[in-house]
């Protein structure tokens, strides 16, 4: 499949009073059409900031400072030739209003907390209908004249002149909202559409958030820890739903999680992040069967063994450094925690070695090193 998104050398920094935090540092990855790309790492590894950087939602004092975010859109490429290379457009080179207008029809996001995507004082149906309506009106205008302001949460992006909560939606948009609720598996969708967010259970509201995210028919759905707050049974159902809608719509999904179990069930390819950098990437099999980076191996080793809970493998000791200091630029920044660290690792930072698809930022990547991590039996 072709690339839908190519992220190159992306860096995002936070300029805080205590100093500069390099939350995302020279990150490279691609998202292909119709695939699920998983980004995995501990909390603080830069996964969420990476996602927010893509959709231009990093908040001050944070800022994307470098890199390209190339997105396949022939129409935009034609309209903004200076930002384009073939069909790929560098989103960072587009005017802000154009970029904002991509949220909904091109990119949508869902989060751990669905409440943050809904206005508590409007019915769920109204809010989804609003998202449908915004989309319908936007599609009727030339792209360069579209502009939107952010509404409540991230789900609703409003066209100029549309007031949230005002009853402007036509019956068609309302019908479409009910249809979307039905598609995400909400029973009695017509009745549930009339209810307020607090009347929904956590799992049902998560489904409603997915329905809202689908209203714009996005090419890429960014899901940031979409099931972390849910109990195990509901979590499995939501993941199943995400898979189904991804396959039906042939949509691309960028799935962000700290949970390798979720990655194993869902992803086609995987990026492992540590301290703001991609330290390893490859197919699901590359990562689970032939991982090279000691950090990836440590993450794999920390998956609890369901069959034999007593035989829990040793997780990596220590935690992600919160501030990358200058010293880290002269050596491997994982060396403090790395069980395989050697002299070489302290002399200069390892290069990202990606001979084929599978690559890692570690000196071991250049050497023969294929002893596999013992995965719990029946993990897949
Ligand atoms: Fe460990 Fe060295 Fe690889 Fe860094 S470069 S992860 S310290 S083996
Ligand atoms: Mg996060």
Image (spheres, rainbow, N blue to C red):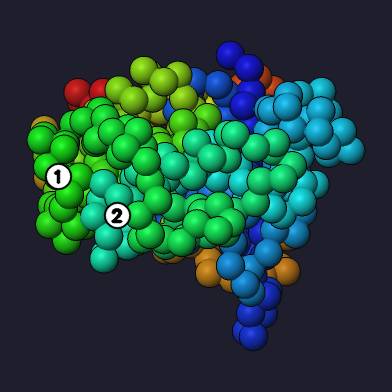
Q: What quarter of the picture does the C terminus occupy? A: top left
Q: Residue furthest right?
A: 82
Q: What quarter of the picture does the N terminus occupy? A: top right
Q: Quadrant of residue 376?
A: top left
**Measured along the vertical axis of the image, is residue 209 above or below residue 307?**
below
Q: For the point 20% across and 41% down, which residue is it?
A: 235
Residue 146 in the image: x percent, y percent? 66, 46
Disc 2 target residue: 114
Q: Nearer the viewer, residue 48 or 218?
A: 218
In the displayed structure image, the side of residue 379 where residue 321 appears, left or right: right
Whether residue 352 is visible: no
Q: Does ligand 2 reach within 8 Å of label 1's beta carbon?
A: no
* Numbered circle sitting on residue 192: 1
Ligand 2 shown in quarter: bottom left
Pick whichever of labels 2 and 1 is earlier in the sequence: 2
**Measured along the vertical axis of the image, is residue 207 above or below residue 77?**
below
Residue 274 in the image: x percent, y percent? 53, 52
Q: Nearer the viewer, residue 207 or 152?
A: 152
Q: For the point 38% across and 59% down, which residue is it?
A: 166
In the displayed structure image, the side of residue 296 where residue 114 appears, left or right: left
Q: For the point 38% across and 46% down, which residue is it?
A: 169
Near mark 2 (Cα within 10 A), the count class, few <14, some 14-19 or many ≥20, is many
Q: Residue furthest bottom?
A: 17
* Numbered circle sitting on residue 257: none
């Amino acid at each position: 499949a072709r690339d839908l998104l190519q992220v190159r050398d992306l860096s995002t920094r936070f300029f805080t009073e205590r100093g500069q935090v390099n939350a995302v540092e020279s990150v490279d990855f691609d998202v292909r059409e119709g695939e699920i790309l998983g980004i995995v790492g501990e909390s603080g590894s830069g996964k969420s900031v990476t996602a927010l950087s893509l959709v231009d939602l990093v908040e001050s004092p944070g800022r994307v400072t470098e890199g390209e975010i190339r997105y396949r859109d022939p129409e935009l490429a034609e309209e903004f030739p200076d930002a384009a290379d073939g069909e790929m457009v560098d989103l960072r080179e587009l005017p802000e209003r154009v970029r904002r207008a991509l949220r909904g029809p091109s990119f949508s996001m869902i989060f751990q907390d669905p409440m943050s995507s809904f206005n508590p004082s409007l019915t769920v149906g109204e809010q989804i209908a609003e998202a449908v309506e915004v989309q319908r009106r936007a599609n009727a205008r030339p792209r360069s004249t579209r502009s939107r302001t952010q509404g409540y949460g991230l789900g609703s992006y409003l066209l100029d002149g549309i007031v949230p909560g005002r009853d402007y939606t036509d019956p068609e948009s309302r019908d479409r909202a009910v249809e979307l609720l039905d598609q995400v598996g909400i029973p009695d969708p017509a009745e549930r559409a009339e209810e307020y967010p607090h009347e929904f259970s956590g799992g049902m509201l998560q489904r409603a958030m997915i329905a809202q995210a689908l209203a714009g028919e996005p090419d890429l759905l960014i899901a940031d820890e979409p099931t972390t707050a849910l109990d195990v049974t509901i979590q499995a159902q939501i993941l199943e739903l995400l898979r189904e809608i991804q396959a039906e719509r042939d949509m691309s999904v960028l799935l962000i999680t700290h949970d390798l179990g979720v990655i194993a069930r869902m992803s086609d390819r995987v990026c492992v992040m540590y301290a703001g950098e991609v330290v390893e990437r490859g197919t699901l099999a590359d990562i689970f069967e032939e991982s090279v980076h000691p950090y990836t191996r440590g993450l794999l080793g920390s998956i609890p063994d369901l069959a034999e809970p007593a035989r829990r493998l040793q997780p990596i000791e220590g935690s992600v450094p919160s501030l990358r200091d200058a010293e880290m630029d002269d050596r491997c920044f994982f060396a403090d925690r790395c069980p395989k660290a050697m002299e070489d690792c302290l002399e200069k930072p390892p290069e990202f070695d990606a001979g084929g698809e599978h690559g890692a930022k570690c000196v071991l990547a250049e050497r023969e090193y294929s002893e596999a991590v013992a995965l719990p039996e029946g993990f897949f």
